[in-house]
Amino acid sequence: MRSSIFLILIILLSINCCGQTVVRYDIIDMHALNGIADKWERYWNIHNADSLATLFAPDIDFITKSGEKSRNHIQSQYLDYRQC
């Protein structure tokens, strides 16, 4: 009895494991993602809020704790942060 429950448990676990897929990105996607990270670092270090905001889509919903949202708000938040 115990061995049959164990066997059923093993079968159910193996079915669940086989159903999972691993997402692998191709080399082009990885270069694009790394490029965005490199640009973010470069723009942040040269204190360029306009260029930093270009990394976001124009219709982004950037919502802060005060409830403001827009791409322009990213620029102003960055400039406010840098002035502190």
Image (cartoon, rainbow, N blue to C red):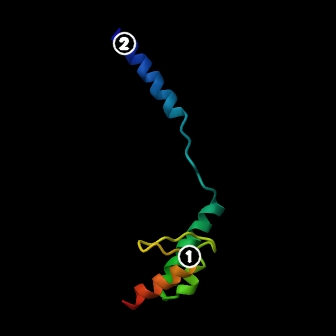
State which quarter of the image contains the N terminus.
Answer: top left
The residue sitting at the bottom extreme is 83
Residue drawn 53% across the image and 38% down it: 20
Task: Using the image, determine if residue 34 lies above or below residue 8.
Answer: below
Q: Nearer the viewer, residue 51 or 6?
A: 51
Q: Nearer the viewer, residue 58 or 27?
A: 58
State which quarter of the image contains the C terminus.
Answer: bottom left
Residue 3's disc number: 2
Type of amino acid under label 1: Ser
Task: Using the image, determine if residue 11 lies above or below residue 70.
Answer: above
Locate residue 78, reporting x and y percent: 46, 83
Locate residue 7, reporting x and y percent: 42, 17
| Alpha carbons under labels 1 and 2: distance apart | 60 Å
Locate residue 71, reporting x and y percent: 57, 77
User: Which residue bears the numbered disc 1?
Assistant: 70
The residue sitting at the top extreme is 1
Q: Quadrant of residue 30?
A: bottom right
Q: Quadrant of residue 80?
A: bottom left
Residue 52's disc number: none
